[in-house]
Amino acid sequence: MSRAVEPVEVALDYGDGSAGAEEIERETESLIEEIEQLGGVLRLSHPPAGPAPAGTRAGDVTAYSSLILGLAGAPAVRSLILLVQDWLARRASGTVTVQVGGDRLELSAGSPAERRRIVEAFLAHLESAVRAEQADRAEPTGSAERPERPEGSDG
């Protein structure tokens, strides 16, 4: 499977601990609404929940702060990252982590210029990795016969 269509995990983090379950849910729903408008989203779900924390009832509401997306190719990954960058820029706090395979991008509500630089570097890295995988797949495998070279030839 190509890196371009691997599941993409998006996690929202309101790291200072001040965000309650309702705020996290509201922010997550806001992001989901915007993601659903993107082209190329094949699947959107929440990761499986672990066991309920000690002292809670099974019927307690779970606040999801993480999403798993299936995207149709590199352009959809780029669109998602640019959307997340814009979405985060409209908020005063928080962090969004986007993970594509083993590559991870963490964005926070800092300087727009710095965020833009980080996003462009991450996207360039992903595009380079996709090109390298495509080149590896294009190389013939096995023991293909090579044309004979004339004796005395260096080339």
Image (spheres, rainbow, N blue to C red):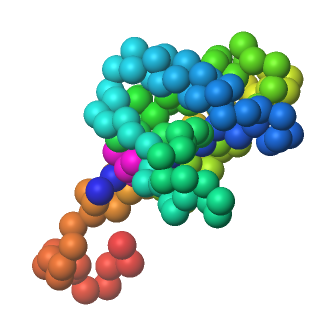
Residue 46 visible in rendering = yes
Find residue 144 and report its image quarter.
Answer: bottom left
Q: Residue furthest bottom?
A: 151
* 102 relative position to 72: left or right: right
Percent across and percent down for residue 121 are 67, 38
Percent across and percent down for residue 5 are 34, 45
Relative to 71, is 100 above or below?
below
Percent across and percent down for residue 97 are 64, 42
58 drawn magenta: no
* Quadrant the N terminus occupies: bottom left
* Quadrant the C terminus occupies: bottom left
Q: Residue at x 40, y 15 (%)?
A: 37
* 63 relative position to 43: left or right: right
Q: Residue at x 34, y 61 (%)?
A: 136
Q: What is the span of residues highlighted in magenta in the rendered image?
A: 3-8
Between residue 66 and residue 63, name the one nearer to us.
63
Q: Residue at x 72, y 13 (%)?
A: 90
